[in-house]
Image: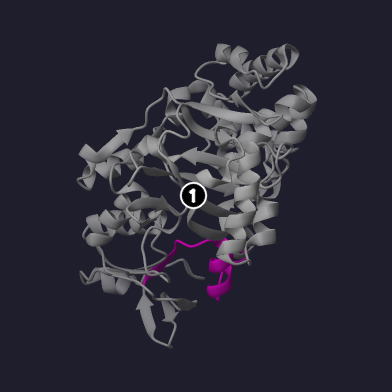
């Protein structure tokens, strides 16, 4: 990343390796550093502001229980992740989570099936009326046709004509309100924490098309024992990673880039990879091009707070995860049963809870105890197995994420297209 976009070719001509700095030791930064280093053509230095690698794919162990601070599972569709696990010697620990425990949503305080292994399984969705089920099936068939060739991993490939409205309004019009609230909005808030009203129709079609054409691709996976931190930590072992290294400034100096860390120490590189959230990149990158500036300014993030409670083993038997529609509860967006991953200690396992963006922003600055108390009260309303019994929930851990997930909004997709 530089104003000129050029390498210092005079150094390369004499056989010198290129110096590359990577800002951010999340999965993106670490995997990029790993792949560059494998070529043997680069000297790589990774800077991480925190005390742990992994970013939103990191784990903290407390009382013998592994709490995934951000994302808490992978899906089969991300083939490169499984390939990375095998390359890093973690293949024997890569596990597909059991498919028998179902995915649910909540309606009127009750759990309703959400697992959709095929189009015809839509008839099992007791969340919806028969009329809404038929409308959803009709929409899925339509989406299947329109989404052929769309690539969720390449937003620039999406047709401009699909980016004229948001996903929620389109579904409410072409299916109905029930489908928009209990399927589309619930799915979006479960994975993204924000409303489908902030999701581009083009992006949603690409994602839904991937699901319709490869339902097995969304089977959940994890790395047994190491959990989400296992892959980032394995990457980091083979790299020069500088932890607790806050970067204050990145700027170009001709064909070279200067990286200034806290304390005023300056590092010089041929190229710098900004593996941070866009808001951080925009703040510390002093000399962006107009295109870089416009793109970075187009990215918005949803906030959440991940809250983890200890519960007795077996409390959520038969449940994998639950998506909570905003219309049912404006605080809880989803919760997952960590027992499926074999996480347990002294007869306890974890239930991990994610929050809708609005609620997260309201409470993100409050104390841990205030957050635990507030979230516990709301969880009891949407988790029937707890039967309103607060004594089953024991505070375990939490993590605040002011920039948890990027919003694939119309504005953002417009920039990508």
Q: Which residues are magenta?
A: 270-291
- Where is residue 76? Give x, y as percent: 39, 32
Does residue 278 show up magenta in the picture? yes
Which residue is the extreme one toward the bottom?
264
In which quadrant of the rendered view does residue 60 lie?
bottom left
Figure check: 109 above or below 119: below
**What residue lies at 57% left-to-right and 63% top-to-bottom?**
369
Judge from the rendering whether residue 26 lies leftward or rightward of residue 12; answer left or right. right
- Where is residue 145? Give x, y as percent: 61, 19
Q: Secondary structure at mark 1?
A: strand
Does residue 30 show up magenta in the picture? no
Between residue 264 and residue 109, name the one nearer to us.
Answer: 109
**Residue located beneath label 1 in the image:** 309
**What residue lies at 30% left-to-right and 51% top-to-bottom?**
230
**What residue lies at 67% left-to-right and 42% top-to-bottom?**
199
Judge from the rendering whether residue 113 lies leftward or rightward of residue 39; answer left or right. right
């Amino acid at each position: 990343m530089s104003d000129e976009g050029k390498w210092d070719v005079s150094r390369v001509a004499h056989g010198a390796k290129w110096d590359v700095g990577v800002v951010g030791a999340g999965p993106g930064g670490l995997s990029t550093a790993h792949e560059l280093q494998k070529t043997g053509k680069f000297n790589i230095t990774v800077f991480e502001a925190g005390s742990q690698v992994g970013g939103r794919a990191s784990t903290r162990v407390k009382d013998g229980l592994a709490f995934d601070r951000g994302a808490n599972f992978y899906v089969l569709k991300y083939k490169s992740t499984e390939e990375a696990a095998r390359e890093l010697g973690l293949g024997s620990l890569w596990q597909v989570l059991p498919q028998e425990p179902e995915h649910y949503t909540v309606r009127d305080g009750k759990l309703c099936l959400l697992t959709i292994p095929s189009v015809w399984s839509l008839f099992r969705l007791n969340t919806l009326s028969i009329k809404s089920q038929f409308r959803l099936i009709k929409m899925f068939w339509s989406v299947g046709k329109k989404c052929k060739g769309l690539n969720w991993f390449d937003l620039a490939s999406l047709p401009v004509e699909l980016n004229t409205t948001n996903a929620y309004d389109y579904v409410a019009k072409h299916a109905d309100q029930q489908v928009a609230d209990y399927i589309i909005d619930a799915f979006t808030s479960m994975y993204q924490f924000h409303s489908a009203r902030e999701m581009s129709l083009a992006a949603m079609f690409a994602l839904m098309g991937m699901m319709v054409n490869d339902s097995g691709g969304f089977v959940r996976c994890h790395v047994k024992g190491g959990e989400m931190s296992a892959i980032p930590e394995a990457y980091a072992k083979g790299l020069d990673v500088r932890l607790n290294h806050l970067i204050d400034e990145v700027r170009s100096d001709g064909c070279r880039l200067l990286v200034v860390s806290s304390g005023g120490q300056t590092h010089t590189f041929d190229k710098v990879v900004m593996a941070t959230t866009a808001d951080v990149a925009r703040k510390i990158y002093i000399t962006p091009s107009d295109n870089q500036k416009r793109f970075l300014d187009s990215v918005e993030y949803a906030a959440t707070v991940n809250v983890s409670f200890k519960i007795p083993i077996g409390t959520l038997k038969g449940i994998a995860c639950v998506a909570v529609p905003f219309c049912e509860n404006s605080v809880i967006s989803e919760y997952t049963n960590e027992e499926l991953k074999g996480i347990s200690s002294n007869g306890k396992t974890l239930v991990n809870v994610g929050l809708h963006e609005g609620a997260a922003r309201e409470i993100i600055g409050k104390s841990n105890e205030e957050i635990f108390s507030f979230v516990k009260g709301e969880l009891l309303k949407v988790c029937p197995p707890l039967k309103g019994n607060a004594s089953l929930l024991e505070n375990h851990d939490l993590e605040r994420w002011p920039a948890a997930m990027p919003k694939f909004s119309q504005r953002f997709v417009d920039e990508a297209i």
